[in-house]
Image (cartoon, rainbow, N blue to C red):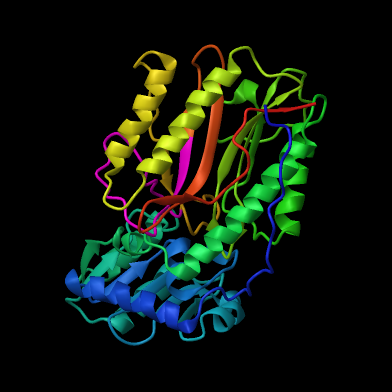
Amino acid sequence: METTTPIPSLQAAPPLASFSPDEHAGRLAATRAEMRLRGLDLLVVVSPENIYHLLGLNHQGYFAFTLMLLPLTGPPTLVARQMEGPTIAAQAPACSHAAFSDAHDAAVTAADAIADLVPAGSRIGVECNGMFFPILTWEHIRTSLSDRQWFDASDLVEQIRMIKSPAEIALVRRAAVISDRAMAAGVAAAGPGVTETAVAASVYRELIASGSDYPGFAPCIRGADILRQEHVTWRDRPLPYGSGLFLELSASAGRYHAPLTRLVHMGRSPAGGERIAETAIAGLTEVTERLRPGAVASDVYAAWQKVVSGGLGHNGYHRHHCGYLVGIGFPPSWVGGSQVVGIRPDSGYVIQAGMVFHVLSWIIDQPPADYVVSDTVLVTETGSEVLTTFPRGPLTVV
């Protein structure tokens, strides 16, 4: 039973500008090449993650309407609040800023900017599934420019950024080191009678002290009595002796994330818990070994399912996925947008080198005990590499 937690080493933090101008130029070129293949004259980008990927705009101003317009030639245009001008000038100096004040309709500014970039009859791709595109704004743009042709291009940038560059992978690695340190801090703070809020405070303190940006998703730190409420977090309540504490967290390094999950017990582990933990950890190991270039996501899920079913002794337990792609993340998510690209039983995605997955092996509501564990895994040219290294358990604190 593991009770000690090594603290990983941490190198100096990278500068705020995480990528070179050449890297951003390459991303724009790759996006424009795909636009040409699809016959598009202009791309309308609304996802903060995709805008950041292409331009490097890293701020909290995405809560207000922000739109990137990418023509086939010439500089991109950002439609954004007037007050964001200094930030845009500093972080995306090669981009034009179509500004609107709070007293004016952003939809009018956006429609005017599009009309200035492409003429009537042009083919325009739009990220239609973005959470950050208000319906009224989209309806105004579409109806006022009805002489343009509109096409769903929600997957265009998403598919390009599934494969991480060496510079991106370096940031994921840094995030993984900080995630490990934050998990160690949370486990060290936990114990019978300690409040969930105290554990959360220790996690946040370590995240920030170690150089993390604000994460795209708040750490999920909750008692095992509400384990099944998968997206709720800490309460101001003491942890009873014999109870479990769920910790799922990620640091953010240059907006890149590396999540991991652990389950910690207060004072003693539940009867039979070690056997369930062994099965869950074996499932995680199996997924890691199966994640290699050319593998199909559904086959990876099937391998995980086989291990878990064998450990449980029946085929009745299933999960909606055993992992999903991660990378750039802005609130409210670290999955990198509105779509979860998961390792699911029905997924035909082909695994490629440079993909980064949050791999999960959770066994819940199966006697004699629950166990959850996850890590961030990088797909390499020859296989995969687990980037988060905190001990997988079972973990007990006193």
> How many tags in the picture?
0
Whether residue 301 is in magenta: the answer is no
Left or right: where does residue 178 sit relative to residue 294? right
* Residue depicted at x 23% and y 77%: 41
Residue 188: in sight, yes or no?
A: yes
The image quarter containing residue 125 is bottom left
Position of 325 relative to 115 (above/below)? above
Q: Within the image, what quadrant is residue 219 found in?
A: top right
Asked whether 139 or 243 is in front, the reply is 243
Q: Give the overall secondary structure of the magenta segment.
A: loop
In the image shown, does 350 or 89 lie closer to the viewer?
Answer: 350
- Tell me where the magenta segment starts and ends, as one range: 336-360
Q: Which residue is drawn at 53% across and 65% down?
A: 170
Residue 378 in the image, given as x and y percentages of width and height: 45, 53
Q: Who's the residue at 38% across and 48% down the image?
A: 339
Look at the picture and state if 111 lies above or below 158.
Answer: below
Q: Where is residue 127 in the image (x, y as percent from the top left)?
A: 33, 60
Residue 371 screen position, x and y as percent: 55, 25
**Identity of the residue furthest to the right in this view:** 193
In the rendered image, residue 342 lying in the magenta stretch gets the answer yes
Q: In which quarter of the image is residue 68?
A: bottom left
Q: Report the quarter where the C terminus lies.
A: top right
326, 226: nearer the viewer = 326
